[in-house]
Amino acid sequence: MFRKALLLCAAGVLASSATLALAQSPQFYRLQLQSDGQYLDADHCTATLGLNPGSTYADGACQLWRLVPEAVRID
């Protein structure tokens, strides 16, 4: 429930930049929780989500996200 709410809030914040990013090459962002500064993190780049103050695994790639339209297939 918390993760879903966090993702929905982040989607609203990044919606305007996602539209601009579609016209350019894909850009990825880190989603940061305001209350304690931790980032949304895919644990070791798996489907398990959590919060983490920072990541060095895969050079931080597990904390990078982008918004895509529903019709776009993610490979």
Image: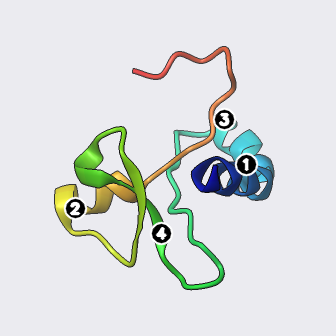
Q: Amino acid at mark 3?
A: Leu
- Label disc, if present, on residue 59 of the rendered structure: 2
Calculate the distance from the C-alpha at mark 4 to the C-alpha at mark 3: 23 Å
Residue extending farthest to the front is 1
- In this rendering, the answer to whether 53 lies above or below 20 is below
- Mark 1 or mark 4, earlier in chain: 1
The residue carrying mark 3 is 22
Give left or right: position of 52 versus 59. right
Tell me the SS state at disc 1: helix
Give left or right: position of 57 versus 64. left
- Label disc, if present, on residue 39 of the rendered structure: 4
Badge 3: few (under 14), some or many (20 or more) residues near its Cα, within 10 Å?
Answer: few
Q: Specify how the rendered protein is coloured.
A: rainbow
Calculate the distance from the C-alpha at mark 1 to the C-alpha at mark 2: 26 Å
Which corner quadrant of the image does residue 53 belong to? Answer: bottom left
- Label disc, if present, on residue 8 of the rendered structure: 1
- Mark 3 or mark 1, earlier in chain: 1
Badge 1: few (under 14), some or many (20 or more) residues near its Cα, within 10 Å?
Answer: few
Calculate the distance from the C-alpha at mark 1 to the C-alpha at mark 4: 15 Å
Q: Amino acid at mark 2?
A: Asp
Marks 1 and 3: in contact by CB < 8 Å? no
Tell me the SS state at disc 4: strand
Tell me the SS state at disc 2: helix
- Mark 2 or mark 3, earlier in chain: 3
Q: Amino acid at mark 4?
A: Tyr
Calculate the distance from the C-alpha at mark 2 to the C-alpha at mark 4: 14 Å
Residue drawn at (56%, 63%), measured in percent from left and top?
Answer: 31
Tell me the SS state at disc 3: helix
- Mark 2 or mark 4, earlier in chain: 4
- In this rendering, the answer to whether 19 lies above or below 30 is above
